[in-house]
Amino acid sequence: MGKEIYIAEKPSVARQFAETLTNRRGIKFSNRDGYMESDRCLVTWCFGHLVTMSYPEVYDEAWKNWQMDPLPFIPDKFLYEVIDSAKKQFQIVKGLLTQNDVETIYVCTDSGREGEYIYRLVDQMAEVGNKTKKRVWIDSQTEDEIIRGIEEAKDLSAYDHLSDAAYLRAIEDYLMGINFSRALTLKYRYTLQECLASKAGANLLLSGGSIMTLLLGIVFLKKQEIAPEKAIMLSLLISMAVLLVVHGILIWNRLHFCEDLLRIFVLTMVSSVVLGLLAFIICHVMPDNPISVLLGTVLGSLSYVICIVMTHTFDPHEWHNVPGSAFPVSFAKYFKLY
């Protein structure tokens, strides 16, 4: 009777499968270099990706020099290679998968597109051939779920469409990364060097990709939306509107629409606008400096203080009884409010 082999995406998951088989089926494993073995089955693992797509210079040495003219790089056939840091484990896995006494392969990589891609590349590079291959598809790594996944494992061919999607996604990322990174670097590196006053020059690399570039764009746009000066300016505009309405009502009730109403409105508006503009200028000059946000907030808050003090101390006989009233008193004297 032939052996079964279980291949997981990482060592920790492989150990969980081995423990489950030991606890539920009484299979005792011995630890080996890169795998675990019993008399009737094997458990091994990848370290994530063991295989990757080859760089352009593998196709042609001329692609080692970055030039704009030959772009875009779109090969007729894509080449793959074992990752240098994973060569030892790949050779172990390859040897196990191609053993003559191994009849059934249980693919236990993560249940998803990337997990499917990881095993398919190993299968492709190891040239496993026509063995029975079953896909273990589980939602968690509990013992019950692992046993269910093994017992209900479907033929690997049932997931060919998922494999095709994984290959196409990888090819898209590869082509965008290779071509856009080279094009952006060749076109803009010296311009960026001047803007950043950098000495990197020819060594400056601008990376581009289908995921990275989009995420950076989203982060940049979101940062623009919540720029400190915009947030503070908006809060100042709202606060000015609220203050003018609320304190206008208070002043109306206290002054009974006397001629001084216009003066207090002007004073309130001028102080709020001036302080708001100062906050805006500070934040605009130093947009990424936390101190600028603090100063802008303080200046904006000061407009509240002026309006509140001016309103609640408008009775000339009460002004000198309010702590810290020197500032509004001096303004009131200047505007001849009493």
Image (cartoon, grey):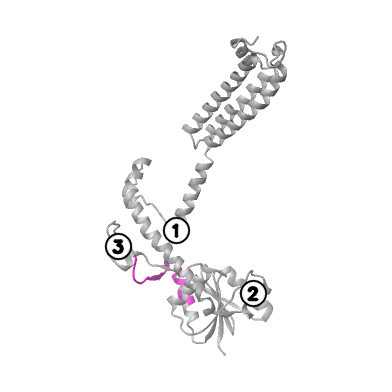
Q: Which range is magenta?
A: 74-93
State which mark lies toward you, 2 or 1. Answer: 1
Nearer-N-terminus badge (2/3): 3
In the displayed structure, would residue 246 be above or below residue 322? below
Q: What element carries label 1?
A: loop
Asked if disc 1 and disc 3 are in contact, CB closer than 8 Å, the reply is no
Circle 1 Cα neighbour tier, 10 Å, few/some/many (<14 / 14–19 / ≥20): some
In the image, what residue occupies the spot 58% across and 82% down? Answer: 41
Question: Which kind of residue does numbered mark 1 sit on?
Answer: Ser
Question: Residue 134's spot in the image, x, y percent?
Answer: 56, 80
Residue with the mark numbered 1: 210
Question: Which kind of residue does numbered mark 3 sit on?
Answer: Trp
Nearer-N-terminus badge (2/1): 2
Is residue 216 or residue 261 the one in the foreground? 261
Q: In which quarter of the image is residue 313?
A: top right
Residue with the mark numbered 2: 146
Question: Residue 267's spot in the image, x, y percent?
Answer: 59, 18
